[in-house]
Image (cartoon, helix red, strand yellow):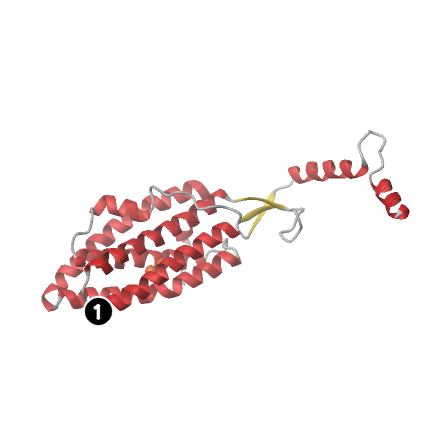
Amino acid sequence: MRECLARVQSRTRLTQNGGSEQENLRHLGAAVRAAVPVAFSRGVLYSLLDPPHAVGAVMAPDERLLRMFSYYRDAELRGATLLLKLMQRLDDPDAQVKLAKHLEEETHHAWLWTKRITDMGGVPVRVDDGYQRRIGLEIGVPKSYEQLFALTVVVEERAHQRYLAHAASPTVDPETRAVLHEVTKDEKWHIAWMENKLREMAGPDGQTRVDELLARYREVDRRVFRELEAKEREAFGFSLSETRAS
Ligand SMILES: [Fe+2]
Ligand SMILES: [Fe+2]
């Protein structure tokens, strides 16, 4: 016990400038860290002197990424809201089964983004000007089944493209890439069944009408997405959508 106490005293002995040796080393470390750049990994900034595994090396999560993942989360939640609207109105039993599965997957995607955000040490950011809100302002409230289905198809196509482009980016960390792969694998099925059902409901005479509706919504989608890309360039200096998706 006495030996142990002596060791502690020797480690904390006062040095010539009045501070303890431990304190002086801590100050020196902080000064050196302040002078070197930071590295980015797992969505969190680290000092280059403190590799990501170092205890106590974690700094604040990157606010820009927290915002981006909050946009993804918001898009998933608003997509789920569209599906719920459809479920409440539609009588088609086949569509009811598919909508239930689809809804479950969209809410799961929203949870995966929420978890990614909290794993980074953040909380979801409120999104008032996300992709779907902007689209809604441009096209108005969808009134018919055809409009609701067509809007969902276009929104799903955008999510699929964007997630692929983000996953292909060399800047993405492994944890985020895993979430991107998880959410992307469901989107192809979502697009396919919604477009098939839309065309089935429209019947042979309604195919041109569906084509025109999809073309109109895709045009709005491109415009809205360009605005969001510009915001992203402002924040990051580049847009992840410029990465060529495979
Ligand atoms: Fe999704
Ligand atoms: Fe989806």
Q: Residue at x 90, y 47 (%)?
A: 3
Residue shown at 87% from the left, 41% from the top: 10
Question: Is any part of residue 238 visible from this angle?
Answer: no
Which amino acid, by three-letter code, is at mark 1? Answer: Pro
Q: Is residue 91 above or below residue 215?
A: below
Task: Identify residue for label 1.
Answer: 93
View extreme (left): residue: 205
Identify the residue at image location x=52%, y=59%: 174
- Quadrant housing residue 93: bottom left
Tell me: 137 left or right of 3. left
Residue 64 vs residue 148, the one in the foreground: 148
Residue farthest top in this picture: 17
Residue 179: x and y in percent read 46, 59
Residue found farthest to the right:
2
Residue at position x 85%, y 30% in the image? 16
Mark 1 secondary-structure assignment: helix
In the rendered picture of this protein, how many numbered marks are placed on residues? Answer: 1
Give coordinates of residue 105: x percent, y percent: 36, 62
- Direction bottom: furthest residue: 94
Q: Residues within 10 Å of mark 1 (few under 14, many from 20)?
A: few
Q: Position of residue 85 (x, y in %)?
A: 24, 55
Looking at this view, is 163 or 129 the one in front?
129
